[in-house]
Amino acid sequence: MTVDSETWSPSDTEIIARAVIEAPSVHDTQPWNLTLPGSAAELEERLEFAEPGADPLRPDRLISCGTAVAHLELAMRVLGRQVRTDLCPFPDRPAVIARIETLGTSVPDSSDLRLYAAISRRKSHREAFTDIPVPAETIGDVVAAGAQVPGVGIRLLASDEAQALADMLTYSAEAKRRNPHYQREMFSWTSHWQPEGNAEVVEGWDATLDEHGAAGKAMITTDVPDTSALATAIDRETVLLFYAASADPIDLVRIGMATERAWLAAVDARLSASVLTHPLRIEDSADRLGARLGMATPPQLIMRIGY
């Protein structure tokens, strides 16, 4: 990290750096670099993670960078800075994801303080939630926190739409099993909805976006799930779908920003959460789900929230 020591004190730098480090990222890769030039902050994409040719993980890396931007904004505002965020593309500097300019001083509002405080408590919950329903008002607060990011839509999955999501997850699992490229991978994303299903426990995480340094045990399903049982399990939970006008880098970064703000708002409300993206990257799964739900653009991320 490069820092302008004349502008940022060691304590300022520590607060900003710690906030960015604690942002969730795909496979915990933290695919960004942070610099603090002058009175601004810049986040760059670390391109060494790019795969030759088509890069199937880049959408999730861009979403990951968006979660770091959300943390960066919060840290700077908590430090009393009034900020303006400009997002990619920057034609002369293609690796830059976001530049956050300091416009002056300001008093952080209570919402920013609560979300910032939630950063240290946020973690992925990959198991089933309790049967306690999330109040509609709380869901509204979570959605409102994410909806403050322009260009991102957040849709609450209705009870009669659980079957559509279950069908998509099953379709993705079957597509992975058919494709030799995926045969070594397990169908892990339905494990929290099938705690008693055909599964084995292995070390590691099945998350796409997880906290820094995550380690533990994850349920990895070894068979294509029973779709009806999966739909019933999904229907018991609160599921949010995040989407934008396109899958361009700027919109994926915005989805990451909105996701993290919603996640922190959930933590502030004493909820837990986890996110799924990988099933949406398998063949045309996202398009199929979007069409089933009558969405103008396909979802890019699925979030579960609950107690």
Image: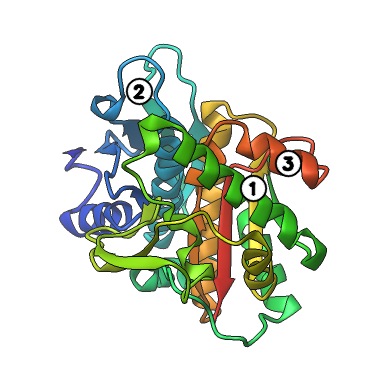
Image quadrant where one finds the N terminus: top left
Query: Which numbered disc covers residue 251?
Result: none
Dot placed on the residue nearer the N-terminal end, 2 or 1: 2
* Residue 108 shows in this picture: no
The secondary structure type at the circle numbered 2 is loop
Residue shown at the point (47%, 76%) measured from the top left: 196
Of the residues shown, which amino acid type is indicated by label 2?
Answer: Ala
Which residue lies under the disc numbered 1?
A: 168
Dot placed on the residue nearer the N-terminal end, 2 or 3: 2
Of the residues shown, which amino acid type is indicated by label 1?
Answer: Met
Tell me the mark number nearer the camera, choosing from 2 and 1: 1
Check the image and tell me how it is coloured: rainbow
Residue shown at the point (78%, 67%) measured from the top left: 159
Which residue lies under the disc numbered 2?
A: 95
Where on the picture, by quarter, is residue 200?
A: bottom left
Figure check: 270 above or below 27: below
Q: Nearer the viewer, residue 102 or 282?
A: 282
Of the residues shown, which amino acid type is indicated by label 3?
Answer: Gly
Where on the picture, by quarter, is residue 177?
A: top left
